[in-house]
Image: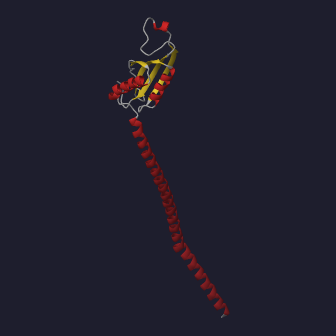
Amino acid sequence: MKVNNLKKIFITLGATILIVFSLVFFVMKPLLVQVKHQSIKYQEKSLLFERRKELESYLRRLKADVKIAQERSLVFKGMLLDSDKTVDFIVRLEEIAIQTNNWQELSIPASKEKKEKYPSQEFNVTLEGSFPNLIRYLVHLENMKWFVGVDSLKISRIQEESRLGKELPEGILPGDVQTNLGLRTFTSNSGL
């Protein structure tokens, strides 16, 4: 009987082990595979969520940058000379010359037929007056509401004999300076 009981125990133990292995193989393995798939899905969703958070953060920064650029653009546009306001610009140059006690002659060079990245209008200005008055004129140019660039600047002392028989303008004395300026103002549309 002892052998019989021992056989029963081994058979029961073998059957239990077989049932456990069967459960593990047929029930637990598919569950483990499903858990593994769910884990991979969770990791993918987590990565997508992190990527989405990064993109949303980038988008917020981009929107803020665009807002700043638009605000700056409005300021910049106000500093561009409208082509139809060129006469206003010329009148302002004449007013500055009068305010600074300079004699002024202004010309507009022939426009070049080239496409510019930043449209502009060129002006050639000849000033005659004292050196301090020239400096005052340049300060006024610098403080204009439009962008004005000085492309060239040539200063020479006025000599009576260098005028080739022309009289000096009123208020201009020998020893004062003659200044040739090449000015450029940037326009919101193509030049004159």
Of 177 and 36, the residue lying toward us = 177
Q: Kindly identify the residue that appears in the image at 47 percent across and 52 percent down.
A: 55
Question: In the rendering, at what x and y percent does residue 23 appear?
Answer: 54, 76
Of 190 and 50, the residue lying toward us = 190
Q: Is residue 122 left or right of residue 31?
A: left
Question: In the rendering, at what x and y percent does residue 125 appear?
Answer: 43, 19
Q: Residue furthest front?
A: 171
Q: Kindly identify the residue that appears in the image at 49 percent across and 21 percent down.
A: 152
Q: Residue furthest bottom?
A: 1
The correct choice, above or below, for 5 with respect to 153 in the image is below
Q: Kindly identify the residue that appears in the image at 34 percent across and 27 percent down.
A: 88
Question: In the rendering, at what x and y percent does residue 1 appear?
Answer: 65, 94
The correct choice, above or below, for 104 with respect to 38 in the image is above
The correct choice, above or below, for 32 with respect to 94 in the image is below
Could you say which quadrant of the image residue 116 lies in? top left
Quadrant the C terminus occupies: top left
Could you say which quadrant of the image residue 99 lies in? top left
Question: In the rendering, at what x and y percent does residue 14 appear?
Answer: 61, 81
